[in-house]
Amino acid sequence: MFYNKFSNFIFLQPTDSIVVTIRGAFPYMFYSSADATTKGIDAQLRYRFLPKWQLTTKASVLRAWNESINDWLIGMPSDRFESEISFFPGNTKS
């Protein structure tokens, strides 16, 4: 688990404007800074339910709050969850 406070956290701020170049049309963005708070958790759980089988589950959750405007901070990664089942055959030589 983690909890961090940042002064002048720098992030990319999108606008409603569009910039047209010879490569195409792109949204206009600029770098901005704000006081921010981040909190979240990174967790992993492994469970061997049979001698040769294992279940692994991972989770990453992040919440970032923009203290300057009292709103969520944009551009943060989404929550991530993974599950995996593994088989360990052991010695396969006869």
Image: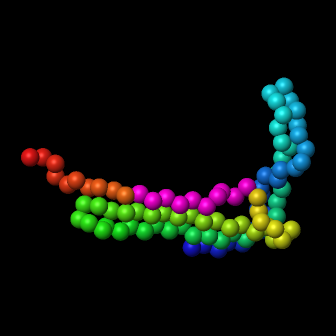
Q: Which residues are magenta?
A: 75-84
Horizontal side of residue 89 vs 59, given as left or right: left
Horizontal side of residue 21 vs 11, given as left or right: right
- Residue 60 location in percent, x, y? 56, 64
Horizontal side of residue 17 vs 26, given as left or right: right
- Residue 93 location in percent, x, y? 12, 46
Residue 5 forms part of the magenta stretch = no
Instruction: Give the quarter of the figure containing the N terminus.
Output: bottom right
Q: Quadrant of residue 48?
A: bottom left
Please give the name of the residue rendered at 45% of the width and 59% of the height, measured from the top-left corner.
Answer: 83
Please give the name of the residue rendered at 83% of the width and 50% of the height, measured from the top-left corner.
Answer: 14
Please give the name of the residue rendered at 65% of the width and 74% of the height, measured from the top-left corner.
Answer: 3
Please give the name of the residue rendered at 33% of the width and 56% of the height, measured from the top-left corner.
Answer: 86
- Residue 72 location in percent, x, y? 77, 66
- What color scheme is it? rainbow
Residue 81 forms part of the magenta stretch = yes
Q: How many marks?
A: 0
Q: Furthest residue to the top? A: 22
Q: Is residue 21 above or below residue 75?
A: above
Horizontal side of residue 43 vs 33, given as left or right: left
From the viewer's side, name the closer residue of 16 and 29.
16
Q: Furthest residue to the left? A: 94
- Residue 22 location in percent, x, y? 84, 25
Q: Quadrant of residue 42?
A: bottom right
